[in-house]
Image (cartoon, rainbow, N blue to C red):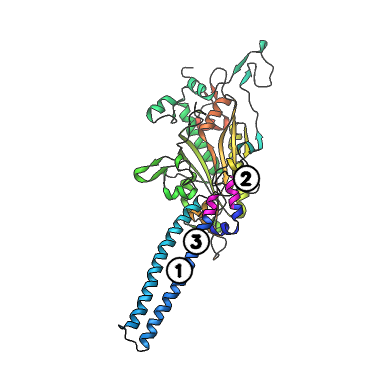
Amino acid sequence: MSVGLQRLRAEPDVIRRGAIDKGEDPAIVDLALALDERRRALLAEGDRLKGERNAASKRVGEAVRGGADPDGPEVSELRAASVAVGDRISALDLEVAGVEAELEEAMLRIPNPADPDVPVGTAEDDVTVRTWGELLPRVVPLAGEVGADAAPGGATWERLPHWDVAAGLGIFELERGAKIAGSGFPVYRGAGAAMQRALIDFFLRTHTTENGFTEIWPPAVVNSASARGTGQIPDKEDQMYVVTRDDLYLVPTAEVPVTNLHRDEILEASDLPVRYAAYTPCFRREAGAAGKDTRGILRVHQFDKVEMVLFERPEESGDALEWMVGRAEDLLRRLGLAYRVLLMATGDMGFVQAKKYDLEVWAPGVERWLEVSSCSNFRDYQARRMQIRYRPAPGAKPELVHTLNGSGLALARVVAAILETYQRPDGSVDVPDALRPFMGIDRIAAPGT
């Protein structure tokens, strides 16, 4: 279950509208309602038949106590009637089990309705909430930074896209990655590998020492129950790499294993909020689709990411989402990367999110915004699938928690933005101040310079 039967029965129009707003077929809502009605009718019929069976059994006892021959025709006829009712009950139980399986499958395919303050529409309807930093241009006066007096004659230099910067520095290799694993699997070398490691360390240290997160180092594969719990299946199974022999999935994000840490558990109110930060390599089959963003490391099949995962009281989850977005923004500010925050419209936010923000950095070499973080509130949608509950007070009935997660941050595009923002006319790249303690260098220069 995802939206919950009680809500489905009470607010069918809201659930149906929520599916339409997300571009999903609302017929799945009607199917679930019909299956629920059928299930309840079958259960009622079963209760009626069980009553008949009990009455038939009672009549057998009364007949025997009244002196009837236990093996005589009267008692035999009564027993036969009881057995017949029992057979009908058994057949009905099988039918109920089948309807319940269909209902569960239908409920899994109903999207999470968006929060009321989420704009309705597609990507064109996303709302820019705020922008931070200077949007550096691709063409820069040689005399100095943007805004300085131009050099005599108007001499300029042009920022290169990150793949050309990387080629000059020798810090990642796409061709050799393709030779090893196929396209979309970059190999980082030298300072490129050091920057990957430094960013992961910087992100995790900030989250754990300043933001109150507990670090998790989870498995890089999950089982189908875990993928179903967070909503990757049945919605996104085609985007996941499958280890078919063992029925395992390579993680598309640390959200999947980390959120499942508390599947089928009851937390105490004093445990909340629970905040986890985890690094994993991430694997996505759909990345690098032909014709778009295939150059460089903007769309790859394997990338590194630090994920924030929160478990919150329902009344706190709205504020928790804003707080989590702020933590991702803080990392971008420290790296000195210009960015914007977008509130995603219903049709651009995904199947399981109730509210979602995207953070995009400005990449001046390609003059484009690059998504580096998505921060989402799922309300109780994932928790219902995974039965993650908390006890509001000692002895109180357990209730569903709210789950949230956000990238803090995704590395491939952060690296691209750093290379394009901090490149210099001589082909070298300055290391952002925040990364210098982790990399041990101030500048990445071409080999031999």
Identify the amino acid type marked 2. Answer: Glu
CB atoms of marks 2 and 1 within 8 Å: no
Q: Measured from the top left, where is residue 224 in percent x and y?
A: 42, 48
> Viewed as shown, does residue 67 lie left or right of 155?
left
User: Gap between marks 2 and 1, in whole Å?
Assistant: 49 Å
Which one is in front, 223 or 131?
223
Mark 2 element type: helix
Residue at the bottom extreme?
Answer: 67
Q: Residue at (40%, 82%) from the top-left corner? A: 59
Label 1 CA crowd tier, 10 Å (few <14, some 14–19, many 20+): some
| Residue matched to label 1 | 46
User: Gap between marks 1 and 3, in whole Å?
Assistant: 12 Å
Q: Is residue 164 magenta?
A: no
Q: Which mark is residue 91?
A: none
340 relative to 16, above or below: above
Mark 1 element type: helix
**The image quarter in which residue 405 lies:** top right
Between disc 2 and disc 1, whose residue precedes? 1
The region drawn magenta spans 15-31
| Residue matched to label 2 | 322
Residue at the left extreme?
Answer: 71
| Residue matched to label 3 | 38
Which one is in front, 328 or 14?
14
